[in-house]
Image: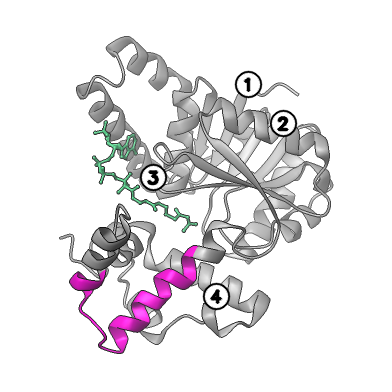
Amino acid sequence: MEIRKVGVIGCGLMGGGIAQTCAQSGYTTVVREVNQELLDKGLARIEAAWQKMESKGKLTTQQAAETREHLRGTINLEDLADCDVIIEAVIENMEEKLRLYPALDRLLKPEALLLSNTSSLSVTQMGAVTKRPGKVAGLHFFNPAPVMQLVEIVRTISTSDETIETVQQFARSLGKTPVLAKDTAGFIVNFLLIPYLISAVRMLENGVASRDDIDTAMKLGCGYPMGPFTLLDYVGLDTTLWAAEAIYDEYKDPLYAPPPLLRRMVQSGYYGKKSGKGFYDYQ
Ligand code: CAA
């Protein structure tokens, strides 16, 4: 199946980065947000990234103009009706996704693929509320989506071989390296990353070391590009909490139980870089 037009649902941190990546790869891309204010904010973030790439010579003026032509924003779901593939990147809330998937299923042509960028929720459950479960899979990007090389392709028990093959080709056409994982909470990366991040929060809670020393230790001791608290702020504390809860729900393994400090910070609106405050202050 040939993919020409891509619909991205959600223009937040991940959806915006995914839409940017698709447009940069030459796909006609429509990104949808729930209201004009959120859409404008998301599109402005993409525009800023393109201006930065232009100023660094990573995009010529002509390439930048062509790339901009490929992207359009909308607040109407109907504008995605003729897309060949949808990448859903809405909030990590299963109720929200279970409302969206049947609506998309009714709207899209029968051969269109429905891919979720979920980081840990059940893609099987999303496919099960559609009449096309064989065409539903996960396509999980990493933040920042235009820069990180990896995508996880998530196969449910119903996803067809043909869908997996098409998604692998599509991922490569975006310049990404795909890895394949079964639909189990956390897939590959978050199953390993979440215990690391929440262990850092527990260390801080227990007074083992300071925030700055833990970050410095992992940066300089392990050569990680960011320490765990910088990464938590970058990924989003809310996103980390949802991922930890989803994996904990699946396995009931205390390793994934969210530490109280993480929960209290999310309850206080300290989501990290995107809200201006997390473990660090960005105001
Ligand atoms: N669009 C285009 N380019 C971008 C960009 C964007 N949105 N954001 C950053 N870049 C570019 C920068 O312009 C820069 O380009 P040059 O090298 O040409 O200058 C390059 O990316 C690196 O950025 P910076 O120089 O600003 O900063 P850096 O060298 O410190 O790298 C980083 C930033 C790539 C984020 C790096 O710190 C890193 O790899 N951090 C770890 C990120 C990570 O682990 N992400 C995964 C999180 S887990 C997740 O996302 C999954 C989940 O479900 C929770």
Mark 1 — residue? 4
Q: Residue at x 45, y 64 (%)?
A: 239
Mark 4 — residue? 245
**Nearer the N terminus, badge 1 or badge 3?**
1
**Nearer the N terminus, badge 4 or badge 3?**
3
Q: Residue at x 58, y 29 (%)?
A: 172
Tell me the CA gap for discs 1 and 3: 24 Å
What's under tag 4, amino acid-wise? Glu
> In front: 4, or 200?
200
Mark 3 — residue? 144
- Ligand 1: give its quadrant: top left
**Nearer the N terminus, badge 2 or badge 4?**
2
Task: Tell me the quadrant of the picture where the C terminus can be found.
Answer: bottom left
Q: Magenta region, mostly helix, strand or loop?
A: helix
Q: Is mark 3 within 8 Å of ligand 1?
A: yes
Region rendered in magenta: 193-214
Tell me the CA gap for discs 4 and 3: 23 Å
Q: Residues within 10 Å of mark 1 (few under 14, many from 20)?
A: few
Q: Residue at x 63, y 83 (%)?
A: 252
Q: Position of residue 256 (x, y in %)?
A: 53, 77
What's under tag 1, amino acid-wise? Arg
Looking at the image, do the residues carrying marks 4 and 1 touch, with CB atoms under 8 Å apart?
no
Mark 2 — residue? 166
